[in-house]
Amino acid sequence: MDEPGKPIACGGVLINDRGVLLRQPTGRFDGYAWTFPKGRPEPGESHEQTALREVLEETGWEARIIASLDCEWEGSSTRNIYFLMEPIRQVQEPDEETAELRWASPFDALKLIRETTNEAGRARDLSVLGPVIKIYAGILRKYGNIEAYLTLAASRSTADDESKKPSP
């Protein structure tokens, strides 16, 4: 159960060889120039389910969670939990809350997020991007590119799913 106080919002940071996926809120809502998809849970949803649903609604991308970013970030109106995600396929257009999507290198993402005028939101998004950059750089050092890592992670996930199936 979540602690009392600000409500929880859950979101995702999608990564691939093109970088990280950012969304520009329609009308730069609440001073956000570029940000990550996120939103509040619907009744009965887990944090993971919320993050996946919000990514789909706000970007049109189906995604798979790679890892939790294992931290909670304060926003101006919510406490925020983010997951690192792999994009699977774009299945629909983003909803009306999103004006534009952009794949950006982690370092270009820093510049784009800094355009946000909402101070709490900008600070949160930059703080979220910090561990993503470390993970991204680590993957590049170890695997040479993001796709090689994502392929390996997906095969491990499939093997884990198979091992959970009951034996005949």
Image: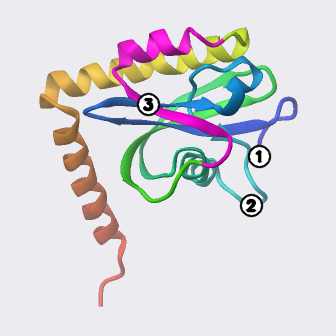
User: Is residue 114 highlighted in magenta?
Assistant: yes
- Residue 72 location, x and y as percent? 63, 26
Position of the C terminus by quadrant: bottom left
Q: Residues within 10 Å of mark 3 (few under 14, many from 20)?
A: some
- Residue 6 location, x and y as percent? 84, 30
Instruction: Residue lying at the far bottom in this picture: please name it.
Output: 168
**Closer to the camera: disc 1 or disc 3?**
3
Residue occupying the point 19% across, 25% down: 140
Residue occupying the point 50% across, 57% down: 92
Say above or below: 92 vs 128: below
Instruction: Residue lying at the far right in this picture: please name it.
Output: 5
Q: Which residue is mark 2?
A: 44
- Residue 12 location, x and y as percent? 52, 38
Q: Secondary structure at mark 2?
A: loop
Position of residue 161 in the picture relative to residue 116 (left or right):
left
Nearer to the camera, 112 or 139: 112
The chosen color scheme is rainbow
Residue bounds of the magenta highlight: 95-116
Residue 36 falls in image quadrant: top right
Q: CA distance from mark 1 to mark 3?
A: 35 Å
Going by the numbered disc 3, the residue's amino acid type is Arg
Q: CA distance from mark 2 to mark 3?
A: 31 Å
**Label pair 2/1, CB-CB below 8 angstroms:** no
Q: Secondary structure at mark 3?
A: strand
Which numbered disc, 2 or 3, marks the residue that appears first in the sequence?
2
Position of residue 50 in the picture relative to residue 160 (left or right):
right
For residue 41, which numbered disc appears in the image? none
Q: Which residue is mark 3?
A: 102
Q: Which residue is mark 1?
A: 1
Q: Secondary structure at mark 1?
A: loop
